[in-house]
């Protein structure tokens, strides 16, 4: 099931990349810029959380899910960064240190605080699994919220396609994570 989901996500991303190549920097608005500037650090944090999994869990399904998250969100960060460059906008910084991260991204839906990430980093085994799944569900829900805002207000076709792909892929992952939480 996970591999089938990954194949769908990757094919969706590839199709979006082809369509996006035709749009260039034209046809964007402030909502598109804000979406890209906010989604980059949001995805960076998801990757940071996914990177914690290997050393802290024995659950192969969680490891596979974390690897899928890393594979999907890395290319999306690259695409968002490219659009911001084409639009003449800054990337909005980056995560930096955890304390800087808290100040820079306060109020962004689904973002974990430095305390959350420290607690997660200190956990292992089943405790880590539960914490990671709950945090990643919350994190994905935040990404979906931002993607829906993009669909409501953005005009760049590639960014709108990416927003829909984020909604589709991350909702499937939320469903998987919730199922894992009820099993454990």
Image: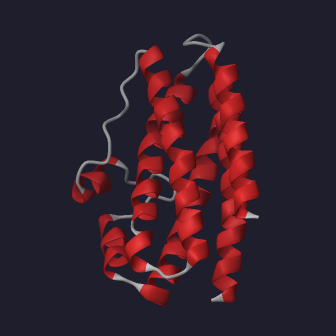
Is residue 91 shown left or right of residue 77? left
- Name the residue: 57% across, 20% down: 29
Q: Quadrant of residue 49?
A: bottom left
Q: State the residue in front, 92 or 182.
A: 182
Total labels: the figure holds 0
Of the 4 image quadrants, the one containing the C terminus is bottom right
Q: Residue at x 37, y 71 (%)?
A: 116
Up the image or down, 165 lies above or below 126; here it is above
In the image, 63: left or right of 5?
A: left
Q: Is residue 138 visible?
A: no
Give residue 163's position: percent from left, percent from top. Answer: 65, 39
Question: Residue 5 falls in which quadrant of the image?
Answer: bottom right
Q: Residue at x 31, y 48 (%)?
A: 95
- Where residue 32 appears, as percent x and y from the top left, is 56, 27
Image location (x, y in percent) of residue 1: 76, 64
Q: Position of residue 169 (x, y in %)?
A: 69, 52
Colour scheme employed for the rendering of this structure: secondary structure
Q: Is residue 1 above or below residue 58?
A: above
Could you tell me which residue is drawn at 37 percent across and 83 percent down? 123
* Up-down relation of residue 163 to residue 171 (above or below): above
Can residue 63 be seen at all in this image of the molecule? yes
């Amino acid at each position: 099931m996970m591999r089938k989901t990954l194949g769908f996500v990757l094919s969706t991303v590839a199709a979006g990349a082809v369509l996006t190549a035709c749009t260039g920097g034209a046809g964007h608005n402030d909502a598109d810029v804000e979406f890209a500037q906010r989604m980059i650090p949001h995805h960076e944090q998801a990757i940071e959380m996914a990177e914690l999994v290997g050393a802290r869990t024995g659950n192969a399904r969680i490891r596979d899910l974390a690897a899928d998250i890393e594979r999907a969100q890395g290319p999306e960060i690259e695409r968002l960064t490219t659009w911001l460059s084409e639009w003449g906008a800054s990337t909005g910084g980056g995560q930096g240190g955890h304390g800087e991260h808290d100040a820079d991204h306060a109020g962004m839906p689904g973002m974990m605080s430095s305390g959350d990430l420290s607690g997660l980093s200190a956990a292992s085994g089943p405790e880590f699994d539960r914490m990671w799944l709950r945090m990643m569900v919350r994190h994905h829900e935040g990404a979906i919220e931002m993607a829906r805002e993009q669909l409501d207000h953005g005009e760049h076709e590639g960014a709108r396609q990416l927003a829909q792909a984020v909604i589709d892929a991350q909702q499937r992952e939320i469903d998987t994570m919730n199922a894992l939480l009820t099993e454990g």
